[in-house]
Image (cartoon, grey):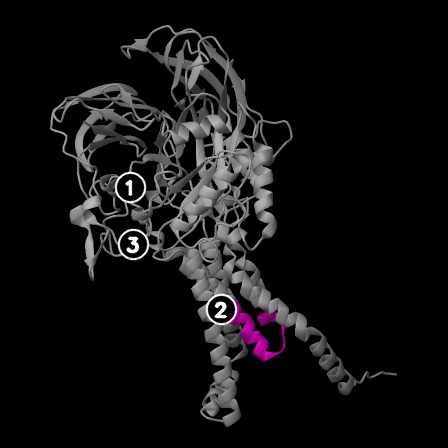
Amino acid sequence: MIKIKIRDNNKIKSSEREWSRWWRIPRLISYGFGIVSLFWYFWCVIGLIIGVFYYIFLNDKAWKRNGIVLASAVGFVTIFVHFYKEIAPLTLVIWFSVIFIISYLVIVIILGILKRKEISYQKILQWAQSYQRISNKKRNAIKLAIIIIPISLWSSVSIDLGVMFDNSPKLLWFNNPTMAKINEPFEITVEAWDSFERLSAIYKGKVEFSIKSYNLSNYNLILNPQADLPEPYTFTGQIFGSDIAYEIRDGKDNGRHVFQASINTLGFHYIIINDSITKNTYYSNPIIIKNFTSADPFIVWGDLHTHSELSDGTGTPEHSFYFAKNIACLDFNALTDHAEIMMFNPWSLNRLETSTNAAYEPNKFVTFHGIEWTCVQTGHYICIFSGNSLLKSPVLDSYFTVKSPNALWNILDDFTSTHGVRALALPHHTTKEAYIQDWTYTNSKYVKLAEVSSVHGEFLFEPRHPLSYVGAIDEPPKYTNGSSIVDAFTMGYRMTMYVSSDEHDGHPGHSLSHTRAYIGHQRPFSLWNTRNEHPYPGGLTAVYVDNLTREGVFTGLENQRIYANSDHGRPILIFRINGTKAGDGSTFIASNQTDHREINVFLAQDGAPVALKSKAASVTRNWVPNWNANIEIIKNGNLWYTEKISSPIVNISIIDTEAITGTTYENSCIKRGNNYYINQYSDNPIDPSTLNTGGFDYYLIRVVGENGRMSYSGPIWVEY
């Protein structure tokens, strides 16, 4: 007997209705979550997955449509943000997402109205019927294309197989202290880097050490320097690579090893390593060996401007400080997350304060409490503090609580006096149109340093100025005076140049966002669209200190005893005028207006491969350091003298016999109504006659390497 099973359609329909009612709320919540993910950089893939899932698996035609619209929005916003650089990515994705949501809601409402009133809706039905008449094969091809297009758009800029899987070693980088005492041991940290400047977990090469030395006085080569260098060593590593090798804690080197050495000959020295894998020879940063005493200041290196997941950066504060100390080999670091973001997470300020104090190791690694005040109209300031507390109340938010620079200065006055600490406010990316700097609000009590270079570019000159060799992102549509650091000096504001990274990728002291490793799947992960707008390598600042403590480093910064470098390199740069060194006011007092000035520059270059805009540090077979460079002396905002060099260590002296005249910004002001302003972006009326150097000259040094590395010192002011 054949049994025939008859379906109960009423039961099936009832079950479907019950399922539909149960699924209605989760379906809506899930879709809303997909829309929110549009803002989440790489993790907008969540919205893509939700949209594709709805299109493939839901039976409701309206929700199928909703799904593919969401997936398409993710695909288009991802590729649009990647290629369109005229607007900050975060701003762009916010506007795109808001417009997308509103536009889609409007279209749905219009279709609903048309359906009810049957106005022109017949045409839509006719189109749908014509689609039904297409063969199944063609319809399936259309459906497949609808799915593939958003996936392809997202994948084309969000997936990089090289970053995912290529961790093979390409070069060696190593670091030793800039200054050490004769015969005393010091550490050499050797790292194998892959194509993206990450540690190569699979590096198993053999390294052999040697040394090249130069006389302290005449800079001639020392033929037989005495040094106790490490024995040849073979690294241990993994079979498979890792994009975050330093997190592998299995006792193997994983691309990094620390050695002990000492040098027994006075001089300037380069440690040299021969590598068995790349077959190249690599130079360290220069090291000075002298009979230093405890009274002699020494040079330390750090990064004052970095971000974590507490605002729009990447990784935990603990991760950032670990990387800064152990992988970037910094002596000091300030984690300076955005106040206007942290104010929405009340716990984040306490977390930042606690983490900063926990990472502080006097005489080993200094951490500063810091926070960023973000003002669109007048420019950003990084605020760092000398003490053990972070300014948490009021939160330095420029939208609600601290709306003007003058309000910021008042709050810093209150905090420093109440807590018995000092503070510095550091302007940065000054020429960016989105946050263009208004120097007329400068408070000399706090604004002693200005960030001349970062992941955003160089800000010494307006990006289109002939002396701006590398440019900067987000330049105003027209050439704009009054925002560059040289313009600020010309106005008479006596600051000193420093360099930081402003990294948002979890790598203080050595950002990776100028390489393809800015990609969203590079760990530490990020929810923010901030990596793909940072095409320049971040830099470092050198500080002369009496001791490696918060007090010691902060005093060096506050007294402007610094110089800086545009990437991970650590040269030695000493700038003097008639014996007066940059720092401690950086002022030389001439006896009269025509007193001769002897400008002296000493430079010992770093031999490491150089990172450039949108390009990782790299070498070729038989690579050697490129020592060709120009030492530029910039006087009163103009290129006054250039010295071409071709050796690692040079010492030049130039005599300036011209009369001291000073310079002025007065003629560059613009007039609106009855008032004068420094440029069209300023809202602060100014007396143009006050914007000058008071009749005094200023000089600064920029070293422009043929390899792309830049170093900065000064300015020094010459009065009479």
User: Which residue occupies the foreground of this view, 476 or 45?
Assistant: 476
Q: Earlier in the sequence, mark 1 or mark 2?
A: 2
Q: How many other residues sit within 10 Å of disc 3, few (<14), some (14-19) or many (≥20)?
A: some
Q: Which residue is mark 2?
A: 145
Answer whether residue 58 is magenta in the image: yes
Residue sitting at the far right:
1
9 or 94, which lies in front? Answer: 94
The span picked out in magenta is 53-70
Judging from the image, what secondary structure is the residue with disc 3 in?
loop
In the rendered structure, does residue 122 fall within the stretch colored magenta? no
Q: Is residue 306 left or right of residue 621?
A: right
Q: The residue tagged with tag 2: helix, strand or loop? A: helix
Residue 432 in the image, given as x and y percentages of width and height: 33, 50
Q: In the rendering, which numbered label is found on residue 485?
A: 1
Residue type at mark 2: give it.
Ala
Q: Is residue 559 above or below residue 401?
A: above
Task: State whether residue 159 appears in this view.
Answer: no
Distance Cα–Cα, label 3 vs label 2:
55 Å
Q: Of helix, strand and loop, which one carries label 1?
A: helix
- Classify 10 Å Cα crowding around label 1: few (below 14), some (14-19), many (20 and above): many
Instruction: Classify residue 443 by image quadrant.
Output: top left
Quarter occupied by the C terminus: top left
Kindly report the secondary structure that dominates the magenta region of the rendered protein.
helix
Left or right of 334, for residue 443 = left
Asked whether residue 491 is in view, the answer is yes
Q: Residue beneath label 3, please?
A: 684
Looking at the rendered image, the quarter that the N terminus falls into is bottom right
Q: Residue at x 57, y 46 (%)?
A: 349
